[in-house]
Image (spheres, rainbow, N blue to C red):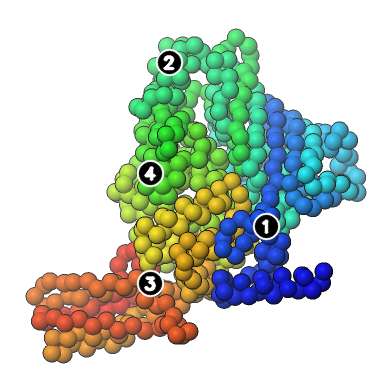
Amino acid sequence: MKNAKLSLILILIAVSADLAQSLYIPLEFEEAYEDGTRSLDGKPGTDYWQNKSDYVITVELDPVKSTISGTAEITYYNNSPDTLDRIVLRLYQNIHKKGTVKDFPFDKDEFTDGMNIQSHAINKKNIDLADTSVEKTGTNLIIKNLNIPPDNQTVINVSWDFKIPKENTIRMGQYDTTTFFIAYWYPQVAVYDDIDGWDMIEYTGQAEFYNDFNNYDVKITIPNYYGVWATGELKNPEAVLAPQIFERYRQAMISSTNVNIITAQDYLTKMAVFNNQNQTSTWHFFASSVPDFSFGCAANYLWDGMTANGGAGKSVFVNAAYNPASLDFYEMCDVVTKTVEMLSKNLPGVPFPFPKIAVFNGKGGVETPMMVNQSSTRQRIWMVHTTVHEVVHSYFPFYMGINERKYAWMDEGFTQMLSEYIQFELDKTIDFRARNVKRYLDNSGQFDEVPMMYPSNLIRGEMYGNQAYFRPCNALNILKDFIGDTQFKKALQEYMKRWAGKHPTPYDFFFTFEDVLDDELDWFWQPWFFRQAYPDIGIDTALFMENNLVVKITKQGELPIPVVLKVKFKDGSDTKVYRSASVWRPSGGEDEDEITIEMETERKVLSLELGNEYIPDADTTNDYWIFK
């Protein structure tokens, strides 16, 4: 047995050396390859597994007391080969307790007791939270001394309540007397995966979530004059909507143009918009195979809806709920519809993953499955920017199951990059590709700029944005540039096909692209994703004699970037020479750090200039050359 295991390790090392070249692979990842849960060609391994849960939740929101109270029955499925001796629950609202670690300043006057667990049972056995078998660590609750064999399910019953925050509104909260967005709100089973086992990372506010793909059956009770918009499909619209509103809702579900489901006129005429036969209404939603559930609720909100073509003959119900004073929201459904259709048709060119997407006029710009929580803005461009970005998150991380806590760049970086062309198509006020270059250069090359492979949950301040959004966005654009649009789309679609509904890691992305392209890309992955490095190229020497221009360009930073050389002539004309980032690809085992560009021309050369607005270059002082 020992010899067989040694042989397997030797084979792994040999294959790793062949496919992964010099990429650093941590021990827990090597163990996953050895166990067969992942493979070095980027595909899920033959023994890949992941766990999941079914959530049946009833919840009541009291807008007067600003409280949430709920009960849940959670059926947890252990699909792993391991016998689990514990369950880890996430109690996100404990971030509001005094003493828990927070990434941002909190209003101390609004500290609460966090999430109050009223009762808790596992397989009908009551759990005493004061028992030594229960451990509380910040936002995690760990129940030990369990025995959950492989291929078994465990039923967790829990009831809880908490005070809805009004000032410390990270991703959720109460925004005025009648407007609430509720996220990070229920006791949630943490992920147990093949890389780390239980995800024990605490929620401290900045890094977002990492969830399994679960089923949610949720009933939300609220006063009858409130509307509710949530993850999943509304199962009882005829029970909660007034007949006329229900008919408009049905029309919106099949209309390719915007339908005003609830209008300002409805409120002015005091027409009933919801079913108010009882003092409260219970809204029933169901969502299958999604990583989270959220909902927004408000009184006196307008509601628009229409359908988008989600690709492959799939209709997507697009809707927006908003304050009548939010003028930018009046075209929200049109912007979301165009975004959904461009995503499904162009890049990534994958059918939209969900049957609906709703934008709720709350605060900030926050994504959850099928939901966007978004502030109003006075400038259309920022409405377009935020809307597009949050809708693209439907693919990354909600379709792909990315661990945002450790690899935020795998969802924010892809989202930032894929949003650029849609944002510019819908509003040309700002070229966001050029802006993302500038934002990256604000921090590039500084001492505390950490590599993208550094765990995101350990990064604080501005560098989180650089590591999660701007550096990866630029890296992906450069990758797309040198492999070409067609090949990039092909590799991206294969990566998404392999890992949709699963939990990809950075190595699954790297190895899938290499597998699809039949190319080793270490020379690119290594500096851009693993190293503390910056981009900088410059003109070293330039000579123009006898109608021949010879320019030597050196790579003074470690990151490979494209070369655009603009040659200006004395007659006022100019021309450009282009080389992709692959010009710096090592040859003969040596890194390329200089290239020579030659050009024959009868025109007299006046000056040279390197770069453009789409190429990040940390030092532009060496990008110019003037001939005397």
Q: Where in the figure is residue 102, as x and y percent of width and height?
A: 66, 53
Q: Identify the amino acid type marked 1.
A: Thr
Q: Earlier in the sequence, mark 1 or mark 3?
A: 1
Q: Where in the figure is residue 399, as x and y percent of width and height?
A: 54, 45
Label annotation for residue 581: 3
Secondary element at tag 4: helix
Label annotation for residue 345: 4
Q: Nearer the viewer, mark 1 or mark 4?
A: 1
C-alpha distance separating marks 1 and 2: 56 Å
Label annotation for residue 266: 2
What is the crowding at mark 1: few (fewer than 14 residues within 10 Å), some, or many (at least 20)? some
What is the crowding at mark 3: few (fewer than 14 residues within 10 Å), some, or many (at least 20)? some
Q: Is residue 380 left or right of residue 492?
A: left
Secondary element at tag 1: loop
Q: Earlier in the sequence, mark 3 or mark 4?
A: 4
C-alpha distance separating marks 1 and 4: 32 Å
Residue sitting at x 42%, y 11%: 269
Q: Identify the amino acid type marked 3.
A: Ala
Q: Are marks 2 and 3 in contact (CB under 8 Å)?
A: no
**626 and 287: which one is in front?**
287
Q: Residue under label 1, please give it.
A: 37
Label annotation for residue 515: none
Q: Identify the amino acid type marked 4.
A: Lys
C-alpha distance separating marks 1 and 3: 34 Å
Q: Where in the figure is residue 401, as x and y percent of width and height?
A: 59, 49
Q: Is residue 427 visible?
A: yes
Q: Earlier in the sequence, mark 1 or mark 2?
A: 1
Q: Earlier in the sequence, mark 1 or mark 4?
A: 1
